[in-house]
Amino acid sequence: MHPIHDVDVLLLMATALAAKRRPAELVEIMAAAHLIHGAIPLDVDLAAAFLRLSAQGLMAEEAGGYALTPDAAAFMAGVRHERKAGPEQHLLAIRLALADYSPRGGGTAIVLATEQIGVAIQAHRAFLKSPGRNMLVPKPKPAPDKTRRPGQWRKPDGGRGAKR
């Protein structure tokens, strides 16, 4: 049995979220990890996780971005979890399924410098401070307005013209 690291599980789920339609850039993967976990792991841990997952054949570098391999996509589709479960339960379900997964190996190792990952983390943090929009970051809910009552307003006379 091979050891399962928390960073591996988070990176696998973040890549699955960020690379749904096309290979994701590092900044997009960092944004997804921040959305899922609330924080971004250390750049050294992320570099080691990229190396481990790619060596196991779960991640690949495509068109300047990173995506799950077809085996990993099938693996992620097969993970059983409740639909209304939170991110913690999703991560736990992936971790348990990854413990039973036997790596096929033969994947091309992705070796990333910690400086490259650090630049992506800093770019994501700078983007969070800017007024731009990011679809991966949840939108804050507006504060409820205490001056207006919820529901439909009616005119004082019942909404109909005065009868004569």
Image: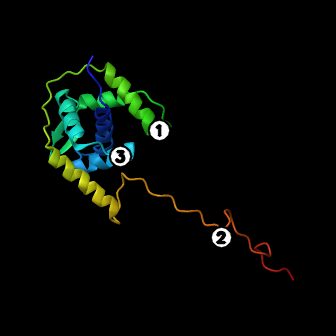
Cα–Cα span, label 3 and label 2: 36 Å
Percent position of residue 54, x then y: 18, 32
Q: Is residue 25 visible?
A: no
Mark seen at residue 147: 2
> Secondary structure under badge 3?
loop
Percent position of residue 31, x then y: 31, 50
Which residue is located at x 30 percent, y 26 percent? 4
Instruction: Tell me how many marks there are.
Output: 3
In the rendered structure, which amino acid carries the disc numbered 1?
A: Gly
Q: Is residue 160 left or right of residue 64?
A: right
Q: Which residue is mark 1?
A: 86
Q: Which residue is mark 3?
A: 39
Q: Is residue 1 above or below residue 95?
A: above
Mark seen at residue 157: none
Q: Residues within 10 Å of mark 2 (few under 14, many from 20)?
A: few
In the rendered structure, which amino acid carries the disc numbered 3?
A: Ala
Cα–Cα span, label 1 and label 2: 34 Å
In the rendered structure, which amino acid carries the disc numbered 2?
A: Thr
Residue reaching furthest bottom? 164
Q: Nearer the viewer, mark 3 or mark 2?
A: 3
